[in-house]
Amino acid sequence: MYAIGTLAKRTGTKVQTIRYYEQIGLMPEPGRTGGGQRRYGDADLDRLAFIRHSRQLGFPLDAIRELLDLSDSPGRSCGEVDAIARRQLREVEARLARLEALRKELRRMIGECRADRIADCRILRVLRDHGECLADHDAEA
Amino acid sequence: MYAIGTLAKRTGTKVQTIRYYEQIGLMPEPGRTGGGQRRYGDADLDRLAFIRHSRQLGFPLDAIRELLDLSDSPGRSCGEVDAIARRQLREVEARLARLEALRKELRRMIGECRADRIADCRILRVLRDHGECLADHDAEA
DNA sequence: GCGGTAATCTACAGCGACTGTAGAGACAGG
DNA sequence: CCTGTCTCTACAGTCGCTGTAGATTACCGC
């Protein structure tokens, strides 16, 4: 049985994040000491490690919730797990494509600017006139 | 002079987003009709187009604010503009590197799983045991 | 000028996934 | 028993919007 800070250190998680996971029902409510402090066991450690690792791979918390649920029914087919992982891969690939387009446009923009004064700056010109731009999607890929 | 909805359509922005930009001081407070509705001119259109296009390239609003300020001093050197653009390029490249690592790991994970039952699922195993994973950074690249 | 309906108004809550803060109380080592 | 570190709750803030509710205004045909 260890305190929340220990669990945090062992999983590379912030204490507040663990409490947040509890609050949204991703981590179970742990036992408490007489004084009201949380005490965790190894099952909690495993679960949190699973969550953190999945987060590192970019899975959203909802997907992680599904994965945790599935992982509790060992007899079922793992097709659903596969589907979630593939969905995440598609997400990552879509972001990659988007970011590659951004990189290309940024490089072009920066490469073209040989001006000294802002009045002639090609970068600002590209930002002003969408027509000079090659990229054309929404932001935050 | 046109209404907010017209400005929204012409720039591909939502009406609320325009009001939000005004609220955070990125767009100036426009003139109003007697009844209190906002009316915009071409300068507003240009400014909003600049903002939207910069957002499409992934610039954060703070950077856009700087770019807009710089763009108002045409005599100055465009070195700062260049620096902001390069910073953004580095951001994009960092995210790309991160996402490429994720893609690799996800592909490996998915490719390895030939199990039928969840109990044997390689994907879940990788998620449980960090040691089996190659990626090792923080999430949300 | 009037009526209907579409657009706009303000104010605020919610998203995702945390992070940070304040002020109070608990625990462990010496 | 004291001291210093940890933990507690509750809530605000991050980023960049997006959605909602309920009231008001503008515009268009008649």
Image: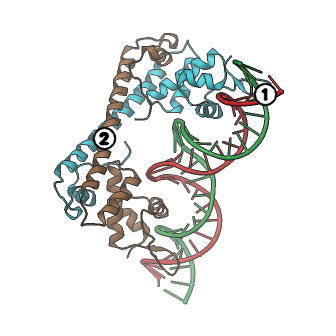
Chain colours: A cyan, B brown, C green, D red
Q: Position of residue B29 (x, y in %)?
A: 45, 71
Residue labelled with disc 2: B90
Seen in the picture, residue A86 relative to A76 is either above or below; the reply is below
Q: Is residue B73 visible?
A: yes
- Give the quadrant of the C terminus of chain B: top left
Secondary structure beneath label 2: helix
Which residue occupies the foreground of this view, B113 or D3? D3
Q: Position of residue B37 (x, y in %)?
A: 49, 74
**Chain hosting mark 2:** B
Residue ID at (31%, 61%): B70
Q: Position of residue A17 (x, y in %)?
A: 58, 33
Disc 1 residue type?
A: Gly
Residue labelled with disc 1: A35
Other residues around mark 1 within 10 Å, as few (<14) / some (14–19) / many (≥20): few
Disc 2 residue type?
A: Arg
Residue ID at (35%, 50%): B59
Looking at the image, residue B134 sits to the left or right of residue D3; the answer is left
Q: Is residue B10 visible?
A: no
Secondary structure beneath label 1: loop
Q: Position of residue B67 (x, y in %)?
A: 33, 58
Seen in the picture, residue A95 relative to B24 is either above or below; the reply is above
- Give the quadrant of the N terminus of chain B: bottom left
In three-dimensional space, the C-alpha distance between marks 1 and 2, rounded to whole angstroms, equals 49 Å
Asked if marks 1 and 2 touch (Cβ < 8 Å), the reply is: no
